Image: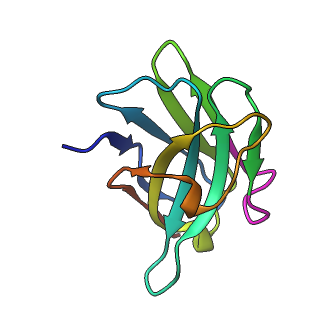
Amino acid sequence: QARLVESGGGSAEPGGSLRLSCKPTVFTLDYYVIGWFRQAPGKEREGISCIHSNEGITAYADSVKGRFITSFDKAKNTVHLQMNNLRPEDAGHYYCATGPAFQGRCPIAAGAFGTWGQGTQVTVSS
């Protein structure tokens, strides 16, 4: 059984928007960092964003700054990734992941995250 479940993937036109969600199945997001990653066919996995569940700090890759926003809904124990102004190069399989949190830190690095979801597919085409 997956400990993280992603949803909200689909197809969008260039300039469109999608909203992804990541929800744990068996644990509460308390003092975790939650990251989003993506992988396009034939390319390496790319870190997208990070959010701290308690401090509210976020970090973004340069490729998505100003277009993507990650947020944490504590009441629903769910992390979201709002993706705006989508480009064809944004297409890929998107994963969320969690890791232990440390004060003042929110890394965009796969090694910081130990629990991963199975991902959700995003396509961007005209």
Left or right of 37 on screen, residue 121: left
Q: Is residue 71 left or right of residue 5?
A: right
The structure residue drawn at horizontal position 79% and vertical position 63%, both measured from the top left corner, is 62
Could you say where residue 17 lies in the image, as x and y percent from the top left?
59, 48
Quadrant holding the N terminus: top left
* In this view, 36 is above or below 92: above
84 over 39 or under it: above or below: above
- Judging from the image, the colouring scheme is rainbow
Q: Residue furthest left?
A: 1
20 magenta-colored:
no
Answer whether residue 62 is magenta in the image: yes
Magenta segment, prevailing SS (helix, strand or loop)? loop
Locate residue 3: give its quadrant: top left
Q: Which one is in front, 3 or 48?
A: 3
- The x, y position of residue 46, in whole percent, is 59, 69
Q: Is residue 22 left or right of residue 26?
A: right
Q: Residue most toward the bottom?
A: 42
Query: Would residue 5 appear left or right of 61 to someone viewing this image?
Result: left
Q: Is residue 124 visible?
A: no
As drawn, 51 above or below 97: above
Magenta residue span: 61-69
Residue occupying the point 69% across, 55% down: 85
| Labels in figure, total | 0
Q: Is residue 119 visible?
A: yes
Residue placed furthest toward the top: 75
Identify which residue is drawn at 66% across, 51% down.
49
Spot occupied by residue 19 in the image (x, y as percentages of width and height): 53, 41
Residue 99 at x, y percent in the picture: 53, 44
Q: Nearer the viewer, residue 22 or 112?
A: 112
Residue at position x 66%, y 38% in the image: 51
